Image: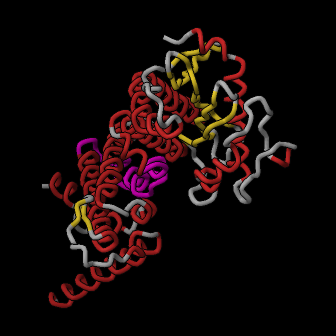
Amino acid sequence: MKEIIKMIVVTTVISAFSAAWLGALNKGLEKRIIRQEDIYIRGPAIKELLAGAPNDPLADRIIIKEGDKTIPVYPWIENGKIKRVAIEWAGKGGYGGDVIVMTAVDLSTLKITGVKVTQHKETPGVGTRAMTPSYLRRQYKGLSAKAEIKLKRYGGQIDAVSGATHSSEAIADAVNKATKFILTHKKEIAINRR
Amino acid sequence: MRALREFTKGFSDQLPPFRLVLGLCPTLAVTTSASNGIGMGLATTFVLTFSNILVSLLRNIIPAKVRIACYIVLIATFVVTVELILKAFFFPLYQRLGIFVALIVVNCIILGRAEAFASKNGVFYSALDGLGIGLGFTLSLTFLASIRELFGYGSIFGIKVIGEGFEPFSFLVKAPGAFVTLGILLYLMNYFKAVKEKGKM
């Protein structure tokens, strides 16, 4: 009995210390990691999706609060007006967890102008086939942001890549939530512009 | 000099991928370029050294029956630490090593050293053992990666060393190339070892 108690206590204490250390480290490095992701992931993705913007969408980001979450919106500002916005959202249902997707929407036509996967843990060569620029362009470009974006098997309009259904689904989920967010917060985005 | 011996054994008779033939997953997977090899090697060295130190410190506290579970927790903690540090300070390297960093947790060299050495020896020797084996692993990975990069891309550390006329064997930087290169290296090492031992007799 004494032995069992010792085993439980030692394992628990070690795990607790590990968890505390990692939590503290994560908190301490969080800001730096976000900055690095801006430089290496979000920056290039925004540059691609909002190519031709006269401003720097990354620097001009607008922070929208929804509940206790803060969500950055990256605007294309031309002549003092926001023409397009890009927004990053995590799509649920991926094979290896969330698929993070950047979606760009034109605010005057309310159509999707581009979609790009920024972070994922899908299988290389399998799930990644649902992330190729040509597939994303074919499926998403020009879709109305007002429509519910779903895979065809759920009555939507998006073709899933066969063998990469989970990845396709996660991307559709992310785009759907991103467009919904932009539609609900359209006014707020315009007001909050610095 | 026991200290020196514990440190240098990682370079000679216990060279991880070639002599112990342990830790082959990263050896085969990330050695597509010399800089990947060195990055992965150093990350592993860091985890190995610190996990050896902690396992050695806690060796009289951890009950034998749950030791593997405790070791895995310690190792995983250091791996996530490395992952966060890479993310915060060496992001491009993190992007390339990607999932392989997380795989250090189950790298058999690390658990192997914890079980075979650190759980039976003092902190000082365990640290040296971890550092030596880790650096040996780094050297091996860099060497293997350099060969594959040299013949596969015609460059080393991203610098072109073979002229334009050279047609690279791009096969070598693909997955099967890792097995072929490692196989040839193992053959050569065993062959020379056998020749040396024969000479002694």
Residue A150, given in percent of the width and then of the height, sits at 79, 40
Residue A69, given in percent of the width and then of the height, sits at 61, 17
A73 shown above or below A8: above
Question: Does residue A192 appear left or right of residue A29 in this picture?
Answer: right
Residue A73 visible in the picture: yes
Q: Residue furthest right?
A: A155
Residue B67, given in percent of the width and then of the height, sits at 49, 44
- Observer-nearest of A145 and A68: A145
Q: Residue furthest front?
A: A79
Task: Kindly indicate the quadrant of the structure image that contains residue B61.
Answer: top left
Instruction: Say whether residue B111 is magenta.
Output: yes
B53 shown above or below B114: above
**Residue at the image position 65 percent from the left and 53 percent from the top:** A135
**Residue at the image position 71 percent from the left and 30 percent from the top:** A177
A34 shown above or below B98: above
**Residue at the image position 57 percent from the left and 29 percent from the top:** A86
**Residue at the image position 79 percent from the left and 33 percent from the top:** A147
Instruction: Say whether residue A69 is magenta.
Output: no
Question: Does residue B136 appear left or right of residue A112 in this picture?
Answer: left
- Observer-nearest of B181 and B195: B181
A35 shown above or below B167: above
- Observer-nearest of B143 and B49: B143
Residue A104, given in percent of the width and then of the height, sits at 60, 33
**What span is in magenta?**
B97-124
Q: Which quadrant holds the C terminus of chain B?
A: bottom left
What secondary structure predominates along the stretch shown in magenta? helix
